[in-house]
């Protein structure tokens, strides 16, 4: 009963380093998202995907890239990390439609990233 | 544009008191979903409830109840006989069914609830 799984849970990066956050969901959801959460800012959408092979920009996409090569996976990349990217990152997934769980977003446990 | 407002940034109540968390939304869509999520101190985001725009019936689940009023664009959340374990940040969210817009799912900034023993 994994749901949405994110790795790693914690990471410290030096400015300029690159890294990839991995997200996997086992609910066969079409849609996947990456959010960041900062104090006082709530949840802000970075990028999202409405299906395998497709991605789109959200509210705060600068400095991030994503890929969705497989339906169950959604990767978030930081090419050159900056201190402003210190945040908690949440992956999420959902399915469209009006069914029982349609349009309900399910979140991973979060990844705490610090850029020094 | 769509908007979700949680005017209460932080609330503190004594255990066993009732508490209501307010959520006001704006949307031009006629079909939409409203949600509440809980974020306990451990950090995960837990789905609590989904309500669609055609269903204005109030919902009760144990000590939790939700009041959806389209006339006032509100979807308030009440915890009855609060417990320390209810201490968390609570987020209200709005989702449209139209997927050609960037504001398809909008979260409020959250209300931090402290239940004092």
Image (tube, rainbow, N blue to C red):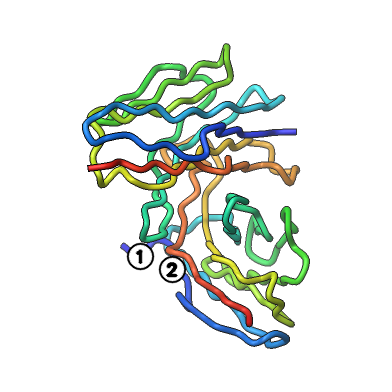
Do the residues at discs 1 and 2 belong to one chain? yes
Q: Position of residue A26 (x, y in %)?
A: 42, 64
- The residue carrying mark 1 is A2
Do the residues under discs 1 and 2 have CB atoms within 8 angstroms? Answer: yes
Relative placement, left or right, of B18 versus A72 is left
Relative placement, left or right, of B53 versus A64 is left
Q: Position of residue A102 (x, y in %)?
A: 49, 41
Q: Which quarter shows the N terminus of chain A? A: bottom left
What is the residue that sits farthest to the top in this orientation? Answer: B71
Q: Relative to B16, does residue B10 appear above or below in the rendering?
A: below
Q: Relative to A26, does residue B52 appear above or below in the rendering?
A: above
Q: Give the quadrant of residue A60.
A: bottom right
| Residue in view at x 48 percent, y 76 percent | A7
In the picture, the disc for residue B68 is none
Between A105 and B39, the residue placed more toward the observer is B39
Q: Residues within 10 Å of mark 2 (few under 14, many from 20)?
A: many
| Residue in view at x 59 percent, y 30 percent | B32
Q: Residues within 10 Å of mark 1 (few under 14, many from 20)?
A: few
Helix, strand or loop status at disc 1: loop
> Chain letter of disc 2?
A
Q: Position of residue A58 (x, y in %)?
A: 72, 55
Q: Give the quadrant of residue A62.
A: bottom right
- The residue carrying mark 2 is A5
Q: Position of residue A5 (x, y in %)?
A: 43, 68
Q: Give the quadrant of residue B115.
A: top left
Q: Relative to B29, does residue B47 appear above or below in the rendering?
A: below
Between A106 and A70, the residue placed more toward the observer is A106
Relative placement, left or right, of A70 versus A81 is left
> From mark 1 to mark 2, how far is it between C-alphas?
7 Å
Between B5 and A63, the residue placed more toward the observer is B5
Q: Which quarter shows the C terminus of chain A? A: bottom right
> Chain letter of disc 1?
A
């Amino acid at each position: 009963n994994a749901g949405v799984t994110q790795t790693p849970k914690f990471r410290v990066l030096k400015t300029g380093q690159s890294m990839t956050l991995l997200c996997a969901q086992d609910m066969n959801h079409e849609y996947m998202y990456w959010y960041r959460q900062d104090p006082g800012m709530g949840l802000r959408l970075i990028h999202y995907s409405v299906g395998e092979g497709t991605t789109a920009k959200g509210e705060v996409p600068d400095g991030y890239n994503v890929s969705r090569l497989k339906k169950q996976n959604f990767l978030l990349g930081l090419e050159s990390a900056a201190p402003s990217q210190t945040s908690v990152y949440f992956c999420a997934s959902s399915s469209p439609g009006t069914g029982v769980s349609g349009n309900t977003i399910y979140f991973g446990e979060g990844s705490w990233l610090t850029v020094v | 544009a769509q908007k979700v407002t949680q005017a209460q940034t932080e609330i503190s109540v004594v255990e066993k008191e009732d508490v209501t968390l307010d959520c006001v939304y704006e949307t031009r869509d006629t079909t939409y979903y409203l949600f509440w999520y809980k974020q306990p101190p451990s950090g995960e985001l837990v789905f609590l409830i989904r309500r669609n725009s055609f269903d204005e019936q109030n919902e009760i689940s144990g000590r939790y109840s939700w009041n959806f009023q389209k006339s006032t664009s509100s979807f308030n959340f009440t915890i009855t006989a609060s417990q320390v374990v209810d201490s968390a940040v609570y987020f209200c969210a709005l989702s449209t069914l139209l997927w050609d817009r960037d504001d398809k799912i909008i979260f409020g900034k959250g209300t931090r609830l402290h239940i004092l023993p």
